[in-house]
Image (spheres, rainbow, N blue to C red):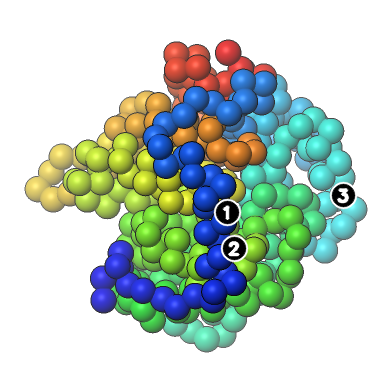
Amino acid sequence: MTNENHSHSITRRSFLHRSAIAASAGWLASGVKAAASEKHGIRLGAPVFDAPQDPDELAQAHRKLGYRAAYCPAVARDDSDRIRAIARAFEKHDVVIAEVGRWVNLLDADPVKRAANLQTVTDGLTLAESVGARCCVDIAGSFNEEVWYGPHPKNVTREFFDAAVENARKIIDAVKPRRAKFCYEMMGWALPDGANVYREMIEAVDREAFGVHLDPCNLVNSPRRYFGNTDLLNECFDKLGPWIVSCHAKDLAWEVEMNVHFREVTLGAGSLDYTTYLKRLAALPGDVPLMIEHMKGKAEYDQSREHLFALGNRIGVGFGDKAF
């Protein structure tokens, strides 16, 4: 079985429902469109260094940097007072909480750890729903017994696909969220590793609360995808656009040696087609957050943020307060 072409049965109700949604967003497939809203633009976000603990001050700290999206602040799932305070403050200052990250291995070989990890992610989705985050996100997991996110030959098999579907259903059914979505982040060596298989997973999970988290750099796992990343981006938006709820921003450079080695770098120092990325993101219905990640310290986050603001200025894509 290949990871891009395997087939899974879906319910007729799910197929008709999903097809209707896709049809309503069919204009995405015609190519890059202009930004949907000059007034609101893209909601950009990133970590805030030396962040204040007070929710109101923290929300204002994001706005001072031009951010209108944020990673979820540290808060316990059962700390209802702080959750309410965060939700009120961030709504007041128009800062969307993009995601609650719960980075654990949902397919851990140890059944006790696997169960604990499933509960960790379930609690994360509960928190996302309570605090008003767009999603709770994790990778689907790995059968690698040494590195929790590492490669393994079974990570691209039907067994992996079916286990990921089962876990997504369990997490969503336990929480029954009305606002937040549960998402898997795509990976280069574990499913979902492309737009086609993610679309199949959406149909197989068959839950309204299952969404798409887009990190295109994670999908660049070959020279073809590296040099063809514009086509890769367009494919993701064409096939997954209606379900995308949050995105990551980073960049990739090719470290030339005797084998293929891609390295994450600051935005603008790599080869990802951010003109296409920003335009396709801005054209989505709603305002899907774009979150900068994996930079090495404050200076690199600042550099990446300013690169996006400058690029947006050149191509006519705004960022809310930084709209052009």
Tag 2: residue type?
Answer: His
Tell whether 127 sits left or right of 113.
Answer: right
Report how far apart the C-alphas of labels 2 and 1 lie in the structure: 7 Å
Give residue 149's position: percent from left, percent from top: 41, 64
| Image quadrant where residue 182 sits | bottom right
Tag 1: residue type?
Answer: Ile
In this view, the residue in front, 105 or 136, is 136
Tag 3: residue type?
Answer: Arg
Instruction: State which quarter of the image contains the N terminus.
Output: bottom left
Give residue 111's position: percent from left, percent from top: 52, 86
**Which residue: 15% across, 39% down?**
256
**Which residue: 33% across, 44% down?**
232
Foreground label between 1 and 3:
1
**How many labels, in total?**
3
Label of residue 21 in the image: 1
Residue situated furthest right in the rendering:
81
In this view, the residue in front, 26 or 249, is 26
Foreground label between 2 and 3:
2
In this view, the residue in front, 21 or 180, is 21
Residue situated furthest left in the rendering:
258
Marks 2 and 3, the one that precedes in the sequence: 2
**Which residue: 40% across, 37% down?**
30
**Which residue: 73% across, 70% down?**
175
Report how far apart the C-alphas of labels 1 and 3 lie in the structure: 32 Å
* Residue on which the image places disc 2: 17
| Image quadrant where residue 307 sits | top left
